[in-house]
Amino acid sequence: MNRKLYLFDFDGTLTKKDTLFDFLSYSFPKEYSYNYFLFTPLFVLAKLKILNKGKVKEKFISKFLKGFSKTAIDKLSNNYFINNHQSLIYPKADQFIKSINNYNDKFIVSASLDFWLQPFADYYDMGLICTIADFDQKGNFTGKFLSANCNYLEKKNRIEKEIDLSLYDEVIAYGDTKGDESMFSITSKNFYRYFS
């Protein structure tokens, strides 16, 4: 039997919307609009590649969550998952992931942060390769990322670092943007916007 590795981008591939903004707006409904307005010029400059996209994202998330304990953030993340996962995940993606034989392995590979992705990975029994939040010795979020922003070439680098690809007969990836092209370069099959 062929052993397969399935790699899934998350936002826009498995989900109907970008979970960075959705998680923060859901968790902080009062502060969200004001903070988003403040950051709009930075988002534009990041889009134009004048500013580093990962650094702008780091600052934006920090605005809401810096100093929060891991316990408090995990509570927000689990609450977000419980109340949104059914409407957020494409039905076709939900069915497909659940149908993958246990002989094979499946991973979410995403630029989104580990704390709000982890409940989704746990629910689908998937591995998780993503941007990692930094917590201090007291267990409080520093507002920084412990890893590089897991997008573009970083996706490929992290996959090769964390998974022994030689164990698999086939590596199959699913994505929806140019940020997934480096991941596609190390797969035997890839699918673009397959579930939407």
Image (tube, rainbow, N blue to C red):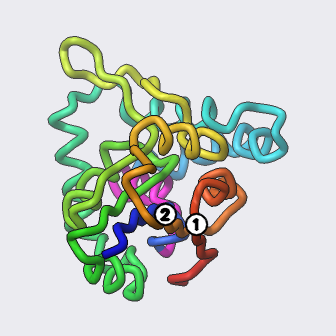
- First to last magenta residue range: 16-28
Does the magenta segment cover residue 181?
Answer: no
Front residue (pair 66, 129): 129
Give the amino acid at mark 1: Ser
Dots 1 and 2: beta carbons under 8 Å? yes
Q: Is residue 111 above or below residue 17?
A: above
For numbered disc 2, what is the local secondary structure? strand
Q: Is residue 151 above or below residue 125?
A: above
Give the amino acid at mark 2: Val
Residue 49, image quadrant: top right
Is 190 placed left or right of 143 in the picture? right
Q: Is residue 133 above or below residue 119?
A: above
Is 14 placed left or right of 135 in the picture? right
Identity of the residue drawn at 27% across and 51% down? 118
Does the magenta segment cover residue 20?
Answer: yes
Q: Residues within 10 Å of mark 2 (few under 14, many from 20)?
A: many
Can see residue 29?
no
Identity of the residue drawn at 63% across and 57% down? 180
Residue 98, image x, y percentages: 26, 79
Can see residue 89?
yes
Which residue is identified by label 2? Answer: 171
Residue 7, image quadrant: bottom left
Provide the major secondary structure of the magenta segment. Answer: helix
Residue 158, image x, y percentages: 49, 39
Residue 93, image x, y percentages: 40, 80
Which quarter of the rendering shows the N terminus? bottom left
In terms of sequence position, does the residue under pointer 1 or pointer 2 come before the other?
2
Which residue is identified by label 1? Answer: 188
Identity of the residue drawn at 43% across and 50% down? 166
Front residue (pair 170, 97): 170
Tell me how far mark 1 sits from mark 2, CA to CA.
Answer: 5 Å
